[in-house]
Image (cartoon, rainbow, N blue to C red):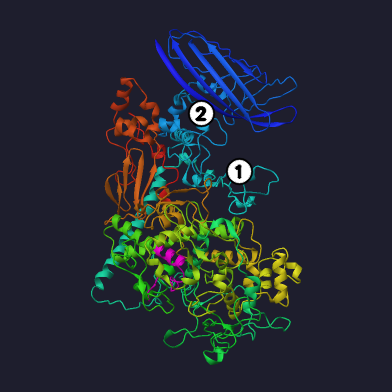
Amino acid sequence: MIKINFEFELNFEIEINFENKVNTDFEVNFEFKSTSRSKSTPRSKSTPRSKSTSRSNSTSRSKSTSRSNSTSRSKSTLRSNSTSRSNSTSSSMSTSRSKSTPRSMSIPRSKSTSRSKLTSSSNSTSRSKSTLRSKSTSISKSTSRSKSTSKEGLLNGATGFLDGSALYGVSVEQAASLRTSGGYVDISKCEQTVNDIDLLVGGMMETAPPGALLGPTFSCLTSKQFNLLKDSDRFWYENDLPPASFSKAQLNELRKVTLSGLICENTRGLRGMQPKAFIREDPYLNAVVSCDHFAQMNLTPWTDADGSPGRDEVPDSIVTMELMKDALKRAAENVARRQRQEYVSYKNCNKHVEPDCPDENGPCNPRSPYRTFTGHCNNLERPNLGKSMTTFARLLPSVYEDGISSPRVTSVTGQPLPSPRLVSSMIHADISYLHSRYTLMVMQFAQFVDHDLTFTPNHRGFFSSIPDCRPCDSAIAVHPECMPIAVPQGDPFYPQRNVTTGERMCLAFMRSLPGQQSFGAREQINQNSAYLDGSMIYGEHACQARQLRGYGGKLNVSVAADRGRDLLPISTVHPECRAPSGYCFIAGDGRASEQPGLTSIHTILMREHNRVVDGLRGINPHWGDDKLYQQARRIVIASYQHVLYNEFLPRVLGWNAVNLYGLKLQSQGYYKGYSSTCNPNIVTEFASAAYRIGHSLLRPHIPRMSSSFTPVEPAILLRDHFFNPDIIYTPHIVDEIMRGLTSTPMESLDQFITGEITNHLFEDRRIPHSGMDLPAMNVQRARDHGIPPYNEYRSLCNLKRATTWEDLSRELPGEVIARLRLIYPTVNDIDLFPGGLSERPLQGGLVGPTFACIIGLQFRQLRKCDRFWYENDDPILRFTEPQMAEIRKATLAKLVCNNLDQPGEIQRAAFDLPNDFLNPRIACGSLPNIDLNAWRETAHQGCQIAGRTVPVGESAIPTPCTSCICTAEGPQCASLRVTDCGRLLREAGRDAVLRDEVCSSQCAAFLSVDSSAALVSLTTRRPSAPIRPASRGRDFAPPGLVPPPPASKRRPSLRSFAPPDVPPFLG
């Protein structure tokens, strides 16, 4: 005899709707006690009776697999929030007998039906009918397994919830504590034990982890199912199993397919759609784009040449002969090159002393795989294109007051132009609108890229001193190139008179250094190279690069006081350093200490270079100092270029503009758009106006975040840390700044700019009103450089040329137009910076159409004109395909994670704010990392194939159905088609064939033969000598790939041998 005592309580929130429209909320508490003694297996029936002030009768029946004797009493109390109250008491008795442990419980139900929400109708006789329904899982028909889907799962033998969740590692205690919020049913009180919870019910009620729709149990089951579908499908589209496999070119086309593209191609009249069809469109990266944006699958790789045999019938002798000729030719070239290098190195041993500052203006070496620091010889036909210390290019001819050099100061009507300070205070007020999608890292990365591309040198005084151009008469008294900015009357911040000297107040400004070497209008110098070559990391010329280099191929560092990760090297001779310690950090660009956020990202990239050097030294210990440095530099620059075009530009410009200007990266293969005739030079409109958009994104403070993403106080006030980087010595401050930049929103890109740079730029806290105004300097710099007005660039970028103020209303908000009218005489006088910055943003982007035009054209040239662009297909310079695949893994999030003192969590898209669904924070270790093994190189310039070193140009057979050839870019392997499985079994052996998936999938019928006699007949007939194609190298043809010779006939030709579909080593 088994005696079971159990107590449980059911809590429901129910809602009663009366016919007289009175809504009353009730709270029902059930207490149910039962004592059961079981001896046999009868069926039980129970009829509870209840007494209530509302005279409601209910009958409940329960069917169970066991018969038991039980006595139960139930009390329920209904409490109403209104004036009506109802108390009811029901008692029930049932008798049953059972031979086993009873597992059934019955929930009383009313005469109507037992549903989830209680609906009661009331009349004069105070009778009520009710319906009970759970908010989540329906408890109907007096049983907890009421849903038809749950019953279906039980009938189909589905496991319980705990059995399914055990696959994920959920313990019984964790499942028992599963609860829901918002009035949902407490499952632990609906089932006798946690082991009774149905898989469907429990799985659906789980809380989904960040970034997922399903809970952990269903996520586990679903992923295992789809993984099984992929692994068990012999015809899976990515499988390399001839003859069903796709060629490499075909796979590249298939990988272009997207759901949005399919819908566009097959929906008549549809003109546009968001790129990600499974995610609702938004105004940013998932904004609706034209259907022309989606790449269409090119079916050319599926066609055969007219008049030639089919792909499966190409004679292998022709293909393999060409392969061998190409491989041997490249091998001979490599040997001759190595011999020349060795001769030169021995010839100049102890004779050549490198000068202190090597001259990079000599002859170009077209076979050098490394960039020069100045950009010299990037273009072999015109070596000085894009070189540092050359002049800016222009989109439109310059406009000077005198046509030659004097900045524009008068309107087209002859009236004076407004002071740049007046433009700044009227148009660029300090009003904050935080962005809803993007982080402050967008601003910081934009500044970092700007310092790679542009640096306009100014005139200097004696001993490289900075002349004081603040006095309004400084052009006469200090330096002829001073051009101070007058403070207008009624300025909201600056006084009319200098409180120290009593003279009229002006803001300091020095003109840019002219650099043209011919007659004509004034042109300005770009001190940096025009290429995306990481000059802000490595330096703009060889002398600076040498100063920044350390030992063993690394960059120079300074040791952190807290024994944390290395910091940038320091200097006491920085001309603009304002740190109390007297030390400022130095990097490839002199502005690395300008503000702590910029210093931090410089530190991250320095650490990344040194981290890559350590990785390369580990896999290539025979590499010298210079090769480690140059190879790590190549990898870091390539990763930086990939992040810029893959993550940054689509957010700034939007996908429509990215496609319009040809900025979309290759998903496979190489870029073939390089042109030696295009001009890569930075245009002055980009440097002096359009790419200064980051000034609008700044916030007054740089936030700091702990490893748990809680704010660290105090935040960094910008005005206190311009060229004062002493705060970087604080332990873990770089980590806190990087977390802050990737976790807090930036300011929206509009005409508004923070007062930290309109009133307090480079301010000396000891001197009142000593700060500068950056937007005013932008306007003044554009006039200094002879940049035409805003209206000229509207016309250039295919916008309507404005003739009246109303013509601007399509691109500019009305309140901006009203303010522009107050300060500019006509629409033809508006400066480019305030006009372009005030435009409404493009769909999916941050900037308006004019700035998108200038920025898009510039970045198109930076890719198209760069011979060393990481995607280029030049065989001397290009990365191998495995290396390209690794570089395409690069993300800003992983780059940051790899170089923090305490890497923890970060969202995948570092430019986007964290979002529990679309952009959740994940562990840094979960992000894909660049595998440096793709750069492994043996000392003998060979390849490791099947455990042995194979020289370049030679081939090897790692498995019976795989052939590999060693090239200068590494081993290239291809699967082979089997034409005679019997021969293959005789030559290679049954075990070897079974281990090779390519062989076993093609010879499955032979491997499944059970007759020993059949196996003997297949393996005993051996030819007198193995057949090998004469055109192949040693061990190139695996055994069994050519049919055995007939007994009385000549040996067949090689037409029966099928080569790989598309050999990868053909390029």
Q: Residue at x 37, y 24 (%)?
A: 1008
Kindly tell me whether residue 366 is visible in this rendering. Answer: no
Residue 631 falls inside the magenta stretch: no
Which picture quadrant has residue 120?
A: top right
Q: To which residue does mark 2 refer?
A: 187
**Residue of label 1:** 262
Is 582 rendered above or below residue 973? below
Q: Indicate the secondary structure of the residue bearing disc 2.
A: helix
Q: Amino acid at mark 2?
A: Ile
Q: Position of residue 1016 (x, y in %)?
A: 29, 23
Q: Which mark is residue 21?
A: none
Q: Looking at the rendering, which quadrant does residue 401 occupy?
A: bottom right
For residue 1026, side relative to residue 416 (left or right):
left
- Asked whether the beta carbons under mark 2 and mark 1 sit within 8 Å of each other, the answer is no
Instruction: Work out how far the residue at label 2 is from the one at label 1, CA to CA, in angstroms.
Output: 43 Å
Please say whether residue 589 is one of the residues in the magenta stretch: yes
Look at label 1 and name its amino acid.
Answer: Leu
Seen in the image, is 448 located left or right of residue 84?
A: left
> In the image, which residues are magenta?
582-605
Which quadrant does the N terminus fall into? top left
The quadrant where residue 577 appears: bottom left
Is 611 rendered above or below residue 11? below
